[in-house]
Image (cartoon, grey):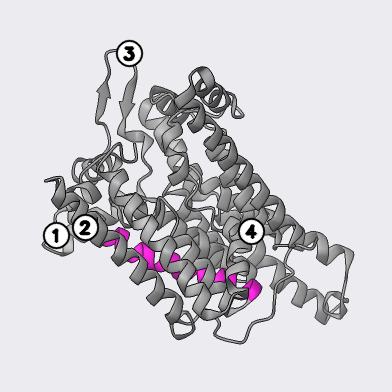
């Protein structure tokens, strides 16, 4: 398996015009989801817009945007929930938009999420189009849109913003724009802790490129004129790799300084939320506990099937020889989501950014006749819309 074996696409493959069918399809799916949420919420006498912008994590982000860091909640069991657990890029954008428009912080969060979701869909298309072609690119966007927890893409959460930055960073790596990839990876690192997955992808691709240059010298690496050409290639790559981790590292170090607990202070903040990385032990116990009674055993079986499906998709991605940065990124997102030690109900939405796992499904969709693929996507979109409306009006994402 090579690191950057990709399908050659025509110039301008990431242009808006080329991506238009994918973006129009994505907008239609998301509009259906919002319509279903509005109807369901009205029937239950709840406010759909509040569910999207002023519940759960959205409240934490808007509080950071309005008041800054330093707020915490002490629970009766001794846990401390600090807003330092939430990375700053989304609240920064909410604050900026609030400052230059009449929008409230909650409204700004919704607008940022709306625009970021479109940017994310475009980025997913650009990556899939670059690797497998335009039809697969459209399929990848639609499959991503109709995921059961796709409604989160329309919430004032950071998933859409992160996916946009991650997808475009990966596209920049695949197309050889190393500095752009590093800058976007750094911004992804300011958005969510899983930004480390983007950093790992950039570094893996960079190291593989260095190794390939050493093992397969060309005329460009010959003495004299070739030395300058080689330096011109190496410098942007090295700079991109240097830039990639700055966002995540900068915020983690700032939290450590802010709390007075040193470089590892951020992990203490996460511990207050009972978050951590235990290799999947706590999640395995959570699943095992489901088999203590018959009704819950069905849920446990469903979780096992879901995890098996995710692992199978990753194996298929490897067998289909996806480029190395996509495999590293998807593998890291998968590992970080499944091996986190708490908030098990959040795992489906934490996996939303792992879009390379959907490329095998996109390829299968692309092989269908257009009429059949439209029927499949339509049915999945309706099911996703109903589930999203039911979910947000019930337990919702923690």
Q: Which of these two is toward me, 190 or 78?
A: 78
Q: Quadrant of residue 256?
A: top left
- State the image quarter where residue 170 is shown: bottom right
- The answer to if 127 sits in the magenta stretch is yes
Q: Which mark is residue 93?
A: none
Q: Earlier in the sequence, mark 3 or mark 2?
A: 3
Is tag 4's residue or tag 2's residue first in the polypeptide sequence? 2
Q: Dot 3 lies on which element?
A: loop
User: Which stretch did the figure color magenta?
Assistant: 111-132
Tell me if I can see residue 298 in this picture.
Answer: yes
Q: Is residue 308 above or below residue 293?
A: below
SS under mark 1: loop
Provide the secondary structure element on which disc 4 rests. helix
Q: Are marks 4 and 2 in contact (CB under 8 Å)?
A: no
Q: Which mark is residue 78?
A: 3
Disc 1: which residue: 103
* Quarter of the image where the C terminus is located: top left
Number of other residues with Cα within 10 Å of mark 1, as a class: few under 14, some 14 to 19, many 20 or more: some
In primary-sequence order, the first of circles 3 and 4 is: 3
Measured along the vertical axis of the image, is residue 23 above or below residue 238? below
- Image quarter in which the N terminus is found: bottom right
Q: What's the mark number on residue 326?
A: 4
Q: Which residue is mark 2?
A: 108
Q: For mark 4, does the 10 Å Cα neighbourhood hold few (<14), some (14 to 19), or many (20 or more) residues?
A: many
Instruction: Give me the residue at 48% from left, 49% from top.
Output: 189
Q: CA distance from mark 3 to mark 2?
A: 33 Å
Q: Secondary structure at mark 2?
A: helix
Coordinates of residue 152 in the picture (x, y in percent): 35, 51
Q: Alpha-carbon distance for marks 4 and 1?
A: 37 Å
Check disc 3: other Cα within 10 Å, few if <14, some if 14-19, many if 20+. Answer: few
Is residue 105 visible from the viewing direction of this image? no
Measured from the top left, where is residue 204 in percent x and y?
69, 54
């Amino acid at each position: 398996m090579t690191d950057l074996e990709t399908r050659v696409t025509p110039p301008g493959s990431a242009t808006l015009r080329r991506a238009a069918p994918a973006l129009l399809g994505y907008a239609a799916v998301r509009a259906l989801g919002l319509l279903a949420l509005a109807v369901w919420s009205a029937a239950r006498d709840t406010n759909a817009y509040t569910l999207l912008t002023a519940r759960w994590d959205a409240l934490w982000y808007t509080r950071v945007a309005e008041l800054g860091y330093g707020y915490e909640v002490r629970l009766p069991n001794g846990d401390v929930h600090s807003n330092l657990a939430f990375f700053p890029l989304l609240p920064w954008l909410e604050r900026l938009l609030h400052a230059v428009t009449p929008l409230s912080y909650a409204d700004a969060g919704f607008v940022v999420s709306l625009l970021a979701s479109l940017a994310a869909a475009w980025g997913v298309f650009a990556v899939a189009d670059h690797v497998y072609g335009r039809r697969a690119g459209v399929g990848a966007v639609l499959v991503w849109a109709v995921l059961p927890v796709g409604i989160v893409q329309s919430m004032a959460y950071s998933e859409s913003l992160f996916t946009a930055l991650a997808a475009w960073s990966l596209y920049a790596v695949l197309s050889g724009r190393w500095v752009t990839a590093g800058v976007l990876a750094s911004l992804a690192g300011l958005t969510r802790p899983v930004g480390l997955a983007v950093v790992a992808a950039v570094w893996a691709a960079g190291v593989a490129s260095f190794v390939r240059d050493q093992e397969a010298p060309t005329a460009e690496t010959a003495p004299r004129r070739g030395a300058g050409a080689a330096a011109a290639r190496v410098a942007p790559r090295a700079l991109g790799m240097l830039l990639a981790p700055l966002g995540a590292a900068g915020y983690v170090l700032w939290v450590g300084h802010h709390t007075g607990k040193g470089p590892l202070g951020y992990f203490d903040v996460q511990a207050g939320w009972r978050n951590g990385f235990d290799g999947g032990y706590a999640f395995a116990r959570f699943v095992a506990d489901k088999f203590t009674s018959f009704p819950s055993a069905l849920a446990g079986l469903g979780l096992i099937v879901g995890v098996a499906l995710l692992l199978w998709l990753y194996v298929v991605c490897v067998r289909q020889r996806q480029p190395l940065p996509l495999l590293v990124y998807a593998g890291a997102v998968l590992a970080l989501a499944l091996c986190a030690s708490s908030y098990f109900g959040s795992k489906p939405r934490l996996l939303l950014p792992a879009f390379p796992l959907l490329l095998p499904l996109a390829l299968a969709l692309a092989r269908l006749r257009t009429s059949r693929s439209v029927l499949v996507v339509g049915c999945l979109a309706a099911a996703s819309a109903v589930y999203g409306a039911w979910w947000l009006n019930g337990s919702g994402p923690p």
